[in-house]
Amino acid sequence: MELVKRFKASYALVLVLLLVPIVFASNSYMIYSSGLVLLYIIMTMALNLLVGYGGQISIGHASFLAIGAFTSAILTLRLGLPFWLALPLSGFFTALIGFIVGLPAVKLSGHMLAVATLGFGAAVPELLLKWESVTGGTLGLTPDNPSIFGYEFDTDIKKYYLLAVITLLITWLIKNLLRGKIGRAFVAIRESEVSAAATGINVSLYKVLMFSISAFYTGIAGSLYAHFVGFISPHDFHISMSFLVLAMVIVGGTASIPGSYLGAILLAMIPQLTNHLPGVSFILTGISMVIIILFLPNGLIDIRKRGISRKRTRPGDGKAAVGTRQ
């Protein structure tokens, strides 16, 4: 029974998204938009791993996405590697860059770390833009459709289901990571670095590890983005994307995997549904963020928590509720 409850809490939103191609079979734009939502979910979970569970600030995750996207495109187009091999290699290469970026995190924290990652987020797109011989510059690159062992995902629905399966797999991997020793160490560092060090946790090692793991999953999302969209340019990975993903973490709920889903779905779908109304998407995004921060300071996931709290404190259960708080 407990396993069933966990399954419902963790994957219900993905299962709903799996029905999108069936409901919108004739609407390719909705399928494409929903695929982008899945990509943002992976990015939001990866950033939440760093911000929510690890307590570290990053405002440059769009650059990790760019590195993963261009690495995958270059491996498949220039070196002729198959997609199924380029996908993990993109993640590992991005993790290596994340390790390098994470080294300053050993000495920096708070707003200083935010400024450092902001500089990284602003520098990478410019570097990719100037490196025309490799990245194509403003012309960008056009990756092929993803294929696994000869099976080509050559339609929007096929690509969508590939994204859905990988999103489900990454969700399972991150949840298992958080339940283990590494996840507990991340949370301990978030609560107090001094206390974590006193219990024998190598704070420096785990802070760098946070960036590496978060960058790995973001690099995977970048590889999927390149082959799902079919065209990438350095202009696609501007700094505002990093702020948007950070907003998804905060709006959905920090240190919460279901919260990552909620935040990504809300803030990713608003621009897609209002793209025919110039400027409206920014207004609606800003209003939704203000409302959620004012009334749900812990994010959208707070709705579920408050619902559970009300059930525990319903009339006649006062003693049980007091016992729970203790």
Image (spheres, rainbow, N blue to C red):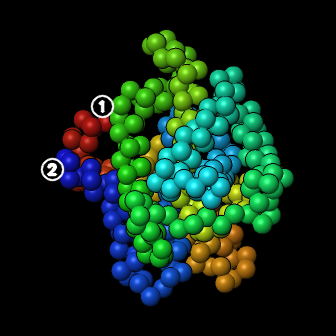
102, above or below 296, in the image: above
The residue drawn where x is 76% and y is 38% is 115
Residue 319 rendering spot, x and y as whole percentages: 21, 40
Q: Nearer the viewer, residue 201 or 232?
A: 232
Residue 294 rendering spot, x and y as whole percentages: 58, 56
Q: Residues within 10 Å of mark 1 (few under 14, many from 20)?
A: few
Q: Nearer the viewer, residue 89 or 191?
A: 89
The residue drawn where x is 36% and y is 80% is 22
Q: Amino acid at mark 1?
A: Gln
Q: Is residue 171 visible?
A: yes
Q: Quadrant of residue 161?
A: bottom left
Residue 180 rendering spot, x and y as whole percentages: 36, 31
What residue sits right under mark 2 in the picture? 1
The residue drawn where x is 43% and y is 75% is 157
Q: Is residue 51 visible?
A: no
Q: Amino acid at mark 2?
A: Met
Q: Quadrant of the C terminus?
A: top left
The residue drawn where x is 77% and y is 60% is 136
Q: Residues within 10 Å of mark 2 (few under 14, many from 20)?
A: few
Left or right, 65 with respect to 131, comes to: left
- Give the residue furthest to the left: 1
Left or right, 79 with respect to 42, comes to: right
What residue sits right under mark 1 in the picture? 326
Q: Secondary structure at mark 1?
A: loop
